[in-house]
Amino acid sequence: MPLLQAPALSAPPPLSLYIHIPWCIQKCPYCDFNSHRLKPDTSEAAYIDALLADLQHELPHIWGRPVETIFIGGGTPSVFSAESINRLLGGVRALVRLLPDAEITLEANPGTFEQARFQGYAEAGVNRLSLGIQSFNDAKLKALGRIHNGSEARAAIEAALAIFPRVNTDIMYALPRQTPAEARQDIQSAIDSGVSHISAYHLTMEPNTPFGRTPPPGIPEEDAAYDIEQAVHQALLAAGFAHYETSAFARANQQCRHNLNYWQFGDYIGIGAGAHGKISSHSGIIRTTRARHPRSYLAAMQDNPAEAIERFQVAPGELPFEFMLNAMRLTQGVPTHLFTERTGLSLAAIARPLQSAVRLGLIDPSPALLRPTERGQRYLNDLLQLFL
């Protein structure tokens, strides 16, 4: 990319809040998220104190800006009690201007232990639950290292739908020794459950995970995995789900607003161990990261929050790639003018790679939209490399 002048944003984009709770009952062998096995001496109260201290420390960077969505992720946030989540969200409301219709999502596991807490989470203000189902097939769940079974998954969805206005299920495909028929059965079970949003993910062998070091036997080859993916996508489309993002499908008006803000290059505060954030100002865009290990994070938040937070300004030359990295995940793309509004750069900054992408059939030639073609969606990495 050519050298670019410092960006000048005319107005800040929408603002979200991401809260990371880094503990799980058991860490899955495919997971590369910042998560740790929950220990008996883990103090929920101390971590909530740290989160609120973290948010308070961030306030000077977002004064006066309303928060439109909250996402409590992990780890597995549902290992925390409803009382702790209530205290957390109460503290958030006291510190920031949370919009009355804010979407508040909490990730949960479908075990019986978590189901008993669903009503309390709703009373605390959670209005969208995201369930880590992955599969309804007991053998596949065991192969993935999950601690719930198919019956518990179905019961959790039924319980969640009775309480929350919006429910998402995460489903994985291209699992060890999985056939297209088994993948279709899994996704059909999710469709039949009545949820309004399904996140369908390809199982990947991430570095520095047990699966990354020693892949399980029977992982489908590339062509077989593509056939499975097509079977999953076709079943969802046939059931009336819109494919609005690389891995996300939703019924009408049921898209995840929080994740849409990420993909449209909005701003977000990221608090909690290992959390990342993005904050725009008149002088540019700042990325933030928190200390990854819970022990280090907790210690810093008790003594000097600044020690746990790293801030760096995104160089103008990196902004085109960062914007496209997010926007090209959306199957309908984004309006062309959003590039200038969210980066502060002229569209001329991406004119050359944009022409190449159109010529290669990776981006729609419409001047009003930055939208990947079907080919661009399939070969997304090739598309994005043009903007490096």
Image (cartoon, helix red, strand yellow):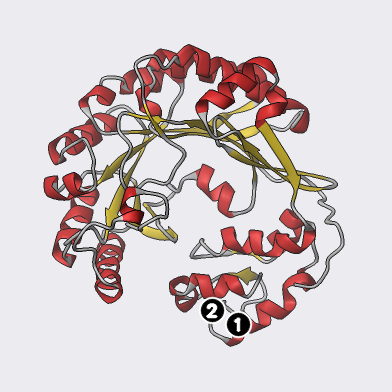
Q: Mark 2 is on which residue type? A: Leu
Q: Secondary structure at mark 2?
A: loop
Q: Eyeballing the image, is 375 above or below 331? A: below
- In this figure, which residue is indicated by the disc labeled 1? 358
Please provide percent x and percent y for residue 80.
39, 21
In the rendered image, the residue lying farthest to the bottom is 359
Please provide percent x and percent y for residue 56.
68, 21
Tell me which corner region of the image, top left, top right, bottom left or bottom right, holds residue 246. bottom left
Residue at 13 percent across and 45 percent down: it is 138
Residue at 23 percent across and 43 percent down: it is 145
> Is mark 2 in CB contact (under 8 Å) with mark 1?
yes
Please provide percent x and percent y for residue 131.
32, 38
Neighbours of disc 2 within 10 Å: few (<14), some (14-19), many (20+):
many
Residue at 43 percent across and 73 percent down: it is 378
Q: Eyeballing the image, is 366 above or below 132? A: below
- In this figure, which residue is indicated by the disc labeled 2? 362
Q: Quadrant of the C terminus?
A: bottom right
Q: Mark 1 is on which residue type? A: Val
